[in-house]
Amino acid sequence: MVDVTPADAVPPAEVGEMELYHPHSWWTKYVFSQDAKVIAVQYSATATAIGLVALVLSWLMRLQLGFPGTFDFITPEAYYQFITMHGMIMVIYLLTALFLGGFGNYLIPLMVGARDMVFPYVNMLSYWVYLLAVLVLVLSFFAPGGPTGAGWTLYPPQAIMTGTPGGQDWGIILMLSSLILFIIGFTMGGLNYVVTVLQGRTRGMTLMRLPLTVWGIFTATVMALLAFPALFVACVMMLLDRALGTSFFMPAIVEMGQQLQHNGGSPILFQHLFWFFGHPEVYIVALPAFGIVSDLISTHARKNIFGYRMMVWAIIAIGALSFVVWAHHMYVSGMHPYFGFFFATTTLIIAIPTAIKVYNWVLTLWRGDIHLTIPMLFALAFIVTFVNGGLTGLFLGNVVVDVPLSDTMFVVAHFHMVMGVAPILVIFGAIYHWYPKVTGRMLDETLGRFHFWVTFLGAYLIFFPMHYLGLMGIPRRYAELTDMTIMTESAHHLNSFISIMAFIVGFAQMVFLFNLIWSIRHGREAGGNPWRATTLEWQTPETPPAHGNFGKELPIVYRWAYDYSVPGAKEDFIPQNVPGTFGPSREPA
Amino acid sequence: MAIALVLVLIVVGSVLFHFLSPWWWTPIASNWDYIDNTIIISFWITGVVFAAVVLFMAYCVFRFRHREGNRAAYEPENKRLESWLTVGTALGVTALLVPGLFVWNHFVNVPREAADIEVVAQQWQWSFRLPGKDGKLGTSDTRDVSAENPLGIAPGDPNGQDDIVVEAADLHLPVGKPVKVLLRSIDVLHDFYIPEFRAKMDMIPGSVTYFWFTPTRTGSFQVLCAELCGQGHPLMHGVVMVDTEQDYLAWLGQQQTFAQLSAPKQTGSANRPSEKTMASGLDVAAKLETLEAR
């Protein structure tokens, strides 16, 4: 069946358009703005700024691991603070905020053909609460005792005890408060994204005509709205344990010879709550990346995404399954061992829809017309690192294989590859792809290629060998790797190599930042649709799009998002808002 | 074009690294070579998939790179191909999962003849308890922990009186005899991990967790803590000595029971490690200093 709507077959709008509230002053236009595009830039800039802190922290911890004993200021206490804040910032304040708050805000209204988010005021509040959460987090660096060093998983009892940095100081209190604020801020934004996708689509934009970017962000947002409450209650309960002496997570404890006043709590309950959030969180980061990379590959290979419907259902299946796999993070936690059978099975089943996505990306390349632009290079690099990280996930998900590997550097290598490097490569690809729409100018090509090669190869050289350190049995979260019988001289050398690569890759990000700033003024003029893409954000009358996105009239959608290289059409792309007058567009029925 | 070459190099390099690099697991010292075999199966299946996907990509990038006048094919779906790939993946996943679950079943079902031993963790040291002549460990409670009773053995339980207490010293085990390791913590989460035995398990204050294994060769093995437990975490080492039956019995003969340790006014009690560690109270720095000195 051909799903292209002819021009005269579109019904009139059910509801007439309403005038937007337009900002009048500089403050309401650029600071307290209700325009989703401005909010997106604010989210992205804040996330990048705090992400730089995380980058520096990773350098500091690599200094210690690569050159142990050389830097006196990196005490074990400081080391644990570095790893904790690095992990928390990267997962929550950078990746989640950038994908949903940044890309979600910018792309959802433009891609579904809406003038803005459905609730612009709440959307604005979402950003300011997020900023507050980031500031509270930063504050903990300056608080007495410094930030918490409990590990990003914040496992009680140690998270709130004396032996852990920040446990009996301000560190953990500020961390938990910041997370609570983040969740409040996210919920305001998240409700907006969901309602906008469901209710704000322009005429003709059926759900099965949405670009996969929107499907990815939408599904991730629904998941986040369901998963973050578990973290929220866990944070509140731990805050009560710490501040008021309750015992939600605290059993009877003798700390350094003293009986504490707690009794009857369950440390493992926290782990269940944490991972009930924490595992979907992996896919909250991954699904937007899946969606975006699908569109990058399709656009730059000039070919429709292969198996669109399968791709949509895979996103939904992964989203649903990700809620029943959380305890695969807890195989050696001491929970009932029979849980292992269930969670290993569900975890490995999730590999099937995930593999389908990978097949469909590479099959999109097959018989394509591949333009090796920078976004395409990043997309290819994403597939390599994601496949690598996904396959090592099959080790860790397969309960008994996890027993020797759990809590070792293998785990660190795995999750960095699959939810660190892979999604960040997509973020880079996406920035090179959409920067021309946001600023009207292209990013510099030479700097971009330098950034790509150093980042991709460097990151692979950091994390691929790291798996083998874990296979040797070297535990993660060790501030000192000395005095260990399994630690060999060559393993120390490998650690030094990894550290040096980490500094180089970090440096390449400075080049990228320079490119971002420099190209705002000096980049080549992009025009409205430099990639000759089909989706609606490239069809706006102005670039960058003005407030209200689409000028006087909203676009009407006549076809799916992937009409590239349609036989019989003059150009090798047909935008979604072009009526069905060309060739046999065989969008799937 | 460079990218196609690099993709091929990544596959070749990764495979060469896997086979040639010096970084590999430690020689095994327990019965859990089943786990090693499962890891090998996983390496083969995932390695083949990784190489296939990345090489296919490299081919596509090379073969279908943009040249003037090229046009992509238009093929939204291919139901047959998609079904075959789904079925193939499902088979691959099953090939990983079935042996995995089979070994897990073995791992969680402790053989009847396994002897109980107990490991008690605290920040940041390991202690051990073995059942006495009655073959039973007495009950315990964190509330009973004191300087005289560092493992919190219930004073009123007759089963506990003859338990052998090894506080902050090496544990010895006889080679070839299966043991069920009961794990307890009196403060935070820890994880009893010996890389050569492959097995590990968290210890949770307020619960008793367990795993089992059979030591298969004699020697000295380092215990590591594998669950972040505060600043002293990387220093929390211990030693398990796997002995011949003879050496083990000789060691066992030198150990003291709970009753002997808790008898009042015993000579030499001032030298017991508990006095040193328990007296320091909440002083983390002092505790870390003693660890560094060891």
Image: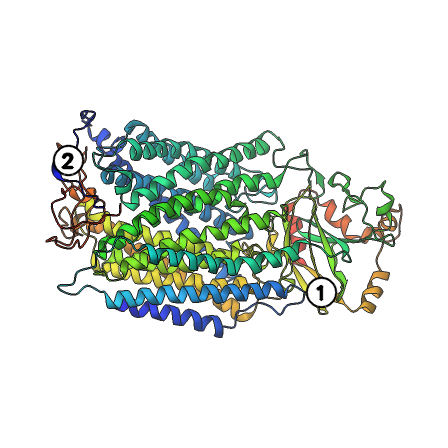
Amino acid bearing label 1: Pro
| Residue of label 2 | A9
For the point 45% across and 71% down, the residue is: B17
How many marks can you see?
A: 2
User: Do the residues at discs 1 and 2 belong to one chain?
Assistant: no
Please tell me whether residue B17 is drawn above or below residue A399 in the rendered image.
Answer: below
Tell me if I can see residue A232 in this picture: yes
What's the chain of the residue with tag 1?
B
Lateral position of residue A141 relative to residue B158, left or right: left
Q: Quadrant of residue A245?
A: top right
Q: What residue is rendered at 85% in x and 46% in y?
A: B159
Q: Which residue is mark 1?
A: B215
A502 or A112, nearer to the observer: A112
Front residue of B3/B109: it is B109
**Which x, y percent locates residue B108?**
66, 53
Tell me: A402 left or right of B142: left
Q: Position of residue A131 (x, y in %)?
A: 36, 36
Side of A131 where A78 appears, left or right: right
Q: Are marks 1 and 2 in contact (CB under 8 Å)?
A: no
The structure residue drawn at horizontal position 53% and vertical position 65%, both measured from the top left corner, is B41
Name the outermost residue toward the bottom: B20
Left or right: residue B97 versus residue A294 is right
- Nearer-the-camera pick, B271 or A151: A151
SS for tag 1?
loop
